Image (cartoon, rainbow, N blue to C red):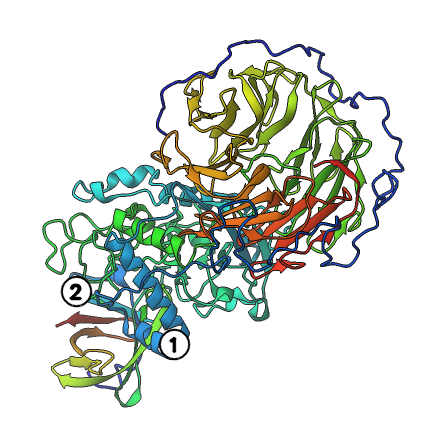
């Protein structure tokens, strides 16, 4: 991110007010009445009258004045400029304009036969090529800024013990991919001088999936012994029924099968647009990774690099026309080449009149030995990025174990089909409920008692599968922490770790990576304070804080769009939005300085990042309308101190989530206390730039929303009976209905 | 050299190539080291020919064609709409090795 001029917020008091209680590792929170609850699971929340519940699923929210709004999608919000907005079509990209194919695609004869014998595949492939052509012509540019991180599942299908390769061998392969697809492989410098300027960073990284398709924690490695002595290129390894292992959902994971292959075959791939059940790559175990059974000359992990190139829609560099000169790899910056090159050729190797530089045989998409291939070109990267924007648009987003980089919330999803919600009861103790993929625990209207007497809405993050960190302030306004480590609550189910400070309002926490936490609070001087967990210890001390300056109104907002990156937003005493950032090395614009982003804001800011180096910030203005600004990697839009007007008259802070690249979902409460929704689908705001979808309810809390996978939303609010209510978008429809809510029990004092 | 002797399945052992002489070994009995892809020629009876080559996704893909003896150890391979013809010269042929030169 570009540096901005340093701009201090008013006020420069430097000490964090009082609160120097010494650290205690385990301490229950002060507040006396530790409301001795029966701790039995499934217990309802204390507070007496369990508000006559709205029972049946799909029931509307109690609370009388259900402003009978027109329920049609696209309804405007009351009080606002009702730009009607149409459609309200959810979750669909309006496909790009059709473009005539202007490039002949000479593929292999057999490939043509396959295409003609499978019309659906042929159609999908044609659409993919049409989309890709738009990129080549500059009519479209990659939509994913920064790095795409793709979760990988490795299916080790073994017959002899030696084929049951080690975790270390698998890890060595992931390491290779993360060098080759980032152009950080040291041997890229071996690229001959004429080709060196063409080498490019593919901006893709890979990691072993940490959540399985059911939301359970996973190593990303599946092992199965088979009676099949050796597999061929017929996809048998991809099915349990034929001695292999079934694919994980191909829209979320890169499936990699490692096995014995016959006939000297090193591996094979499936291009985008094919059947999900066979999508992925297959690699010979002795050509996988760099250790264990990996054997020269295919011992540097380049077979997987090559196959994943195909999986991202790259063609062979010689154009798949045998040894002819008429084929094309559909990439402009690679030379025309006759047939495949093998072994370790010396530069140059001329064919098809491509002297003096000859064939680009050192490209990953040729057939040379592992030590002889070390580069992708910029044109190939563009083609892979077009694939990620098009047929593989859902891969490498938050699903499949990607970590949430949203700021903390009372509701969090640490994996697919998993939800954890935290509330305060009337005794101001913490209560917890969860969705495990099948059921609500401890019961649909029950809560787990977690002790404490809390003064702030619970703030939770999950930095990994089956991991939760909960932060609240106590009656002494100090910060308190508890955590779920997968097996038990620490320091105890109803105990808390004391973290010092005297905090005003809710703390905000974000995790930019596994076992990393960054906590932000406001002190009594209303300056911003920061502390962090680095995996081993709390900095600057378990009860200490780093002073970050400013005099802030309302709550800070924090977001991490990448590892070791933080962006913090606060409202100053002049009502303007202010910003500071950690770039991995230092705070910008300075430790206690802020970048002024303009506006007169009536709500705390809400920020999300749908990709690397991308930020979207939402506030409400003095007219109650929603306003938006964004960082696109180079500049603030619409301007550094300007905002986009988004209509409505909003009560409280907006809630925004993103479930994929270039996707935003915004939820606000209207003056009728109903929930309203709008969305950015990559091309336009729905139902209209200043219009909203009416979602019913009479809400007494701000909406809390999370997205545990692409095209999935879970919304939580409290009703006039102080109970919790839930609704969800499943990719096709709102449940229990567009304007209905699921009753979740409780009498909630803070959420 | 005659048709009977050319029968069988031969796979390109490209590591043994000598200039423009391409070396093929019996597909099913020779211990080929792993490769990203190899060409295989299956000479069948009655002039039937199946060529295997790595496809765009690296899987072996087959193309059906025909082979025809031209004399002087020369043979035409393919020649169908799907497989344009090419002429090879057999320079050595034993049960263990087939060496050809593309013309």
Pick whichever of labels 2 and 1 is earlier in the sequence. Answer: 1
Task: Write down the quadrant of residue A430 in the picture.
Answer: top right
Does A653 appear above or below A82? above
Measured Cα–Cα span from mark 2 to mark 1 = 28 Å
Q: Secondary structure at mark 2?
A: loop
Name the quarter where the N terminus of chain B is drawn: bottom left
Crowdedness of circle 2 by 10 Å Cα count: few (<14), some, many (20+)?
some
Does A629 appear above or below A661? above
Between residues A346 and A114, which one lies in front from this camera angle? A114
Between residues B8 and A99, which one lies in front from this camera angle? A99
Q: Chain of mark 1?
A: A
Q: Residue furthest bottom?
A: B46
Q: Position of residue A574 (x, y in %)?
A: 49, 21
Crowdedness of circle 1 by 10 Å Cα count: few (<14), some, many (20+)?
few
| Disc ID at residue A86 | none
Residue behind mark 1: A119
Q: Secondary structure at mark 1?
A: helix
Between residues A636 and A670, which one lies in front from this camera angle? A670
Task: Write down the quadrant of residue A268 in the picture.
Answer: bottom left
Between residues A477 and A542, which one lies in front from this camera angle? A477
Residue behind mark 2: A325
Which residue is drawn at the image coordinates 23% and 86% (left, top)? B3
Examine the rendering and report whether any part of residue A690 can be seen: yes
- Please indicate whether residue A535 sits to the left or right of residue A740 in the image: left
Q: Chain of mark 2?
A: A
Q: Position of residue A251 (x, y in %)?
A: 50, 57
Q: Are marks 2 and 1 in contact (CB under 8 Å)?
A: no
Examine the rendering and report whether any part of residue A414 can be seen: no
């Amino acid at each position: 991110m570009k540096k901005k001029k340093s701009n201090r917020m008013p006020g420069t008091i430097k000490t964090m007010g009082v609160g120097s209680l010494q650290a205690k590792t385990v301490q229950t929170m002060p507040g006396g009445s530790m409301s001795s609850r029966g701790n039995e699971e499934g217990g309802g929340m204390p507070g007496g009258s369990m508000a006559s519940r709205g029972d049946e699923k799909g029931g509307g929210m109690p609370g009388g004045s259900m402003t009978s709004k027109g329920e049609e999608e696209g309804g405007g919000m009351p009080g606002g400029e009702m730009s009607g907005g149409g459609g309200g079509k959810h979750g669909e990209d309006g496909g790009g304009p059709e473009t005539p194919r202007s490039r002949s695609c000479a593929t292999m004869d057999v490939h043509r036969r396959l295409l003609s014998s499978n019309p659906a595949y042929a159609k999908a492939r044609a659409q993919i090529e049409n989309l890709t052509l738009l990129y080549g012509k500059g009519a479209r540019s990659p939509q994913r800024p920064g790095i795409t991180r793709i979760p990988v599942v490795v299916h080790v299908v073994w017959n002899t013990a030696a084929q049951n390769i080690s975790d270390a061998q698998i890890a060595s392969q992931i390491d290779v991919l993360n060098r080759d697809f980032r152009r950080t492989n040291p041997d890229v410098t071996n690229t001959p001088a004429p080709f060196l300027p063409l080498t490019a960073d593919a901006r893709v990284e890979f990691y072993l999936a940490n959540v399985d398709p059911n939301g359970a924690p996973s190593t990303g490695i599946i092992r199965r012994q088979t009676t099949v002595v050796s597999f061929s290129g017929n996809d048998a390894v991809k099915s349990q029924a034929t001695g292999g292992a079934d694919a994980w959902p191909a829209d979320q994971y890169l499936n990699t099968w490692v096995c014995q292959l016959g006939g000297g075959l090193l591996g094979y791939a499936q291009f985008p647009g094919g059947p999900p059940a066979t999508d992925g790559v297959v690699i010979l175990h002795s050509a996988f990774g760099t250790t264990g059974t990996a054997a020269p000359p295919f011992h540097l992990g380049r077979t997987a690099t090559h196959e994943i190139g195909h999986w991202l829609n790259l063609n062979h560099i010689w154009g798949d026309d045998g040894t002819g000169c008429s084929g094309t790899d559909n990439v402009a910056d690679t030379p025309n080449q006759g047939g495949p090159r093998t072994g370790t050729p010396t530069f140059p190797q001329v064919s098809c009149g491509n002297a003096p530089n000859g064939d680009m045989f050192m490209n990953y998409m040729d057939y040379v030995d592992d030590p002889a291939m070390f580069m992708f070109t910029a044109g190939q990267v563009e083609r892979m990025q077009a694939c990620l924007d098009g047929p593989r648009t859902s891969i490498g987003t938050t699903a499949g174990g990607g970590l949430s980089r949203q700021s903390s919330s009372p509701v969090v999803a640490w994996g697919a089909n998993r939800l954890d919600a935290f509330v305060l009861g009337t005794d101001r103790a913490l209560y917890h409920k969860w969705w495990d993929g099948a059921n609500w625990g401890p019961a649909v209207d029950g809560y787990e008692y977690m002790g404490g007497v809390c003064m702030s809405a619970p703030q939770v993050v999950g930095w990994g599968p089956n991991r939760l960190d909960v932060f609240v302030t106590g009656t002494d306004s100090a910060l308190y922490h508890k955590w779920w480590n997968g097996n038990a609550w620490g320091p105890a189910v109803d105990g808390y770790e004391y973290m010092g400070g005297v905090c005003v309002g809710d703390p905000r926490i974000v995790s930019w990576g596994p076992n990393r936490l960054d906590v932000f609070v406001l002190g009594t001087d209303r300056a911003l304070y920061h502390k962090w967990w680095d995996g081993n210890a709390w900095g600057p001390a378990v009860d200490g804080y780093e002073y970050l300056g400013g005099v802030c109104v309302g709550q800070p907002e924090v977001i991490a769009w990448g590892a070791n990156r933080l962006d913090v937003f606060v409202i100053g005493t002049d009502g303007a939005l202010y910003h500071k950032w950690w770039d991995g090395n230092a705070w910008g614009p300075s430790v206690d300085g802020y970048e002024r982003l303009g506006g007169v804001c009536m709500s705390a800011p809400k920020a999300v990042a749908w990709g690397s180096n991308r930020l979207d910030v939402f506030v409400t203005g003095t007219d109650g309308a929603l306003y938006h600004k964004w960082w696109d990697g180079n500049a603030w839009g619409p301007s550094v101190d300007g905002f986009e007007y988004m209509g409505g008259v909003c009560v409280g802070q907006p809630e925004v989530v993103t479930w994929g690249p270039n996707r935003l979902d915004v939820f606000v409460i209207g003056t009728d206390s109903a929930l309203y929704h709008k969305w950015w689908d990559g091309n336009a705001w729905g139902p209209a730039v200043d219009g909203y979808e009416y979602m019913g309810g009479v809400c007494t809390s701000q909406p809390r929303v999370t997205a545990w996978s692409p095209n999935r939303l879970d919304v939580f609010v409290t009703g006039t009976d102080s109970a919790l209510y839930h609704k969800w978008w499943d990719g096709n429809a709102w449940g229990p209905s567009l304007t209905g809510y699921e009753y979740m029990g409780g009498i909630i004092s803070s959420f | 050299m005659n048709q009977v002797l050319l029968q069988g399945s031969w796979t390109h052992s490209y590591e043994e190539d000598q200039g423009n002489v391409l070396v093929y070994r019996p597909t099913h009995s020779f211990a080929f080291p792993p490769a990203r892809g190899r060409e295989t020629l299956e000479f069948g009876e009655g002039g039937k020919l199946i060529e295997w080559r790595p496809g765009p996704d690296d899987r072996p893909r087959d193309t059906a064609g025909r082979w025809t003896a031209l004399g002087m150890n020369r043979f035409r391979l393919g020649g169908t709409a799907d497989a344009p013809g090419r002429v090879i010269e057999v320079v050595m042929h034993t049960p263990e090795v087939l060496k050809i030169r593309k013309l």
